[in-house]
Amino acid sequence: MVLGPDLVLTDVNEAACRVTGRTREDLVGRYLFDAFPDNPADPDADGVQNLRTSLYRVLSSKEPDTMAPMKYDIPVADRPGVFEERWWSAINTPVLGPDGQVQWILHRGEDVTSFIRSHPRLRDGGALSDVEAREVELYARARELKRLNEELRKAHARERRIALTLQEAMLHSPHLPRHRDTAVRYLPAAGSLNVCGDWYEVIDLPDNRCAVAVGDVVGHGLEAAAVMGMLRSALSAVVRAVERPARALDILSLYARDVEGALATTVVQAVVDIRARRIMYSSAGHPPPILLHPDGTFDLLDQATDPPLGARPQDVPHPHADLPYNQGDTFVLYTDGLIERRGEDIDDSLQRLTDVLTRHADNEPEGLADALLADLGVSRGARDDIALVVIRL
């Protein structure tokens, strides 16, 4: 219920009408204690006194006041002079106007009558001990938590639907279906909304080349996903316009300085020249991609590594490297959620990854991607987000 400083009812919600059996038209505009007087048949009735004291306390202190559970009978709407026993747990909260004075009071009452009547020690309707009052208060708060949890569940479901739509839009790679020997995986951190700051991209370029990238924005959720979308789109455009991956990262790093939340993003960009059978690459603070050979040996692409985006002066170019590959090799790019474990040295993490790759070197890309997630224990999510690209060259 909403009260003015004069304790006249200015608004009531549907629940207040339902629990009191009154209509909004019957209540709005009436003085609170004319609408809800004490029960004249109960000589010990003190509901009006207790509630009035709390409301005046709010008016003078301008602070919320939580009331102890109390008995406050209410009139039966269609039976004049008849009152129904009710118990309440209530809080009164001030709403201040522009002048700093109390403009309204929000009175929120929780009907705990059913709990009182079902409690063996409280059925007589007598005064509550401190312990009993706390039990009633806990009961009221438990009901409130149940209601809030239901609202949160519904809100989470709505946000998850939004998140899934956002994920599908942001990670759409129109050229990917052309690459039948490519497997991609995207796993948000366990407990997240299915969106994160990790991304992958596969783009066909002129002269029988293709660009492959993976990146990782710090953080999780919709904010990180929004930053990811901007950086991914920018890099996708730039790599089409410049020759070398390192130059693409130079431009992306400059762009990241103007995007809130983009600094410290890691990314690796590679260009596969199919005609020359060479891989050009450059990395901004990202874990090294791996070129896996059919016999289980491998090369770490760690010769062109720089700090994350925005960490270097603007006039310092990113490093560049390239290496040859043979037909049948497998190119593996990933984000750190695949390998990093709390308290573990990064060299040990990379060793575990390459051990798995060696064991499954003869797998097709889809099978190899599944084996990586399973053997590294992240099939159902990890502490961090994961993006993974596996390409049979």
Image (spheres, rainbow, N blue to C red):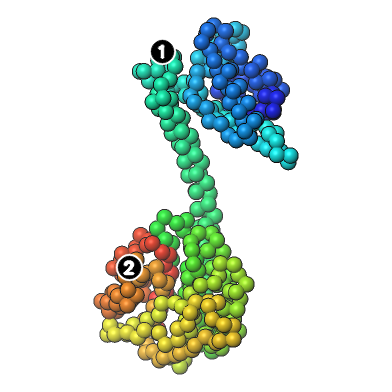
Determine whether 60 is above or below 22 in the image: below
Residue appearing at x 40%, y 84% in the figure: 302
Residue 355 position, x and y percent, is 27, 77
Name the residue located 59 percent from the left edge and 83 percent from the top edge.
Answer: 314
Q: Amino acid at mark 2?
A: Gly
Q: Can you say which quadrant of the picture contains the C terminus?
A: bottom left
Structural crowding at the residue carrying mark 1, measured as other residues with C-alpha within 10 Å and reported as few (<14), some (14–19) or many (≥20): few
**Kind of residue at disc 1:** Asp
- Residue in view at x 60 percent, y 70 percent: 259
Q: Are marks 2 and 1 in contact (CB under 8 Å)?
A: no
Spatial separation of the CA atoms under disc 2 and disc 1: 60 Å
Q: What residue do we see at 56% from left, 20% from top?
A: 50
Q: Which residue is mark 1?
A: 124
Whole-percent x and y of residue 112? 47, 24
Label 2 packing within 10 angstroms: few (<14), some (14-19), many (20+): few
Q: In the rendered image, which residue does mark 2 sit on? A: 343
Tell me: 8 left or right of 338: right
